[in-house]
Image (spheres, grey):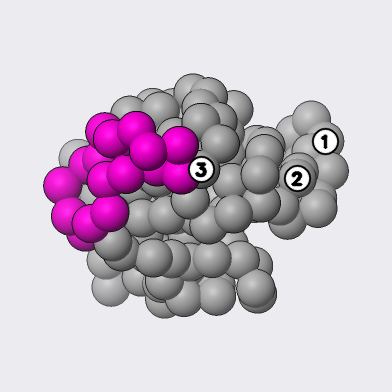
């Protein structure tokens, strides 16, 4: 991951950047670490690539990480973002060793640009979605549901 304040693309045009600091990862089109996340649809400052966040995340997994995406693949690095995620929208990518990220095992959302280290989020033991967890291994939604049953 690169946090930078450069607002000029390689073509000399001013790019629209989110507030500093922001996240940049490798672009699936030009293979340069110029894909800016966190300002709506990801946009490459070098080649101009842009797609909706879920599509850009899928392109990243296939073209940069070199993985194939199967239907209902439980080992897929595409996940719902715990910060901005809409149910069913897989905009967060589990980064692997060598991927540009704040931590080689981090999770990065291609929509909101939020990033987490490997020990900052985990799967909820009840709903199985990635979320920030409490001391009992449940996300806030499942914890609230558990409280309401008692």
Q: Is residue 17 magenta?
A: yes
Q: Check if mark 3's residue and mark 2's residue have beta carbons within 8 Å.
A: no
Kindly identify which numbered label has been placed on residue 70: 1
Provide the secondary structure element on which disc 2 rests. helix
- In the displayed structure, does residue 132 sit left or right of residue 98? left
Q: Quadrant of the N terminus?
A: bottom left
Q: Check if mark 3's residue and mark 1's residue have beta carbons within 8 Å.
A: no
Provide the secondary structure element on which disc 1 rests. loop
Q: Earlier in the sequence, mark 3 or mark 1?
A: 3
Q: Earlier in the sequence, mark 3 or mark 2?
A: 3
Q: CA distance from mark 2 to mark 1?
A: 15 Å
Q: Position of residue 73 (x, y in %)?
A: 76, 41
Q: Is residue 128 magenta?
A: no
Q: Position of residue 134 (x, y in %)?
A: 27, 66
- Mark 1 neighbour class, 10 Å CA radius: few under 14, some 14 to 19, many 20 or more: few
Q: Which residues are magenta?
A: 5-21
Q: Main secondary structure of the magenta part?
A: loop
Provide the secondary structure element on which disc 3 rests. loop
At 16% across and 47% down in the image, what residue appears? 19
User: Which residue is the extreme one toward the left?
Assistant: 19
Q: CA distance from mark 3 to mark 1?
A: 30 Å
- Residue 97 in view here: yes
Q: Position of residue 111 (x, y in %)?
A: 38, 36
Q: How many marks?
A: 3
Q: Nearer the viewer, mark 2 or mark 1?
A: 2
Kindly identify which numbered label has been placed on residue 80: none
Q: Which residue is mark 2?
A: 63
Q: Nearer the viewer, mark 3 or mark 2?
A: 3
At 53% across and 57% down in the image, what residue appears? 33
At 67% across and 39% down in the image, what residue appears? 29
Kindly identify which numbered label has been placed on residue 46: 3
- Mark 3 neighbour class, 10 Å CA radius: few under 14, some 14 to 19, many 20 or more: many
């Amino acid at each position: 991951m690169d946090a930078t304040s450069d607002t000029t693309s390689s073509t000399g045009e001013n790019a629209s950047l989110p507030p500093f600091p922001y996240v940049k990862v490798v672009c699936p089109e030009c293979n340069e670490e110029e894909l800016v996340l966190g300002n709506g649809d990801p946009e490459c400052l070098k080649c101009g690539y842009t797609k909706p966040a879920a599509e850009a995340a899928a392109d990243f997994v296939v073209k940069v990480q070199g993985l194939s995406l199967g239907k209902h693949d439980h080992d897929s690095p595409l996940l719902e973002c715990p910060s901005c995620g809409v149910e069913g929208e897989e905009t967060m990518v589990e980064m692997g060793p060598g991927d540009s990220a704040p931590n080689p095992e981090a999770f990065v959302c291609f929509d909101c640009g939020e990033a987490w280290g490997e020990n900052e989020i985990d799967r909820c033991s009840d709903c199985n979605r990635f979320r920030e967890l409490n001391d009992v291994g449940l996300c806030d939604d499942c914890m609230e549901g558990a409280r309401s049953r008692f």
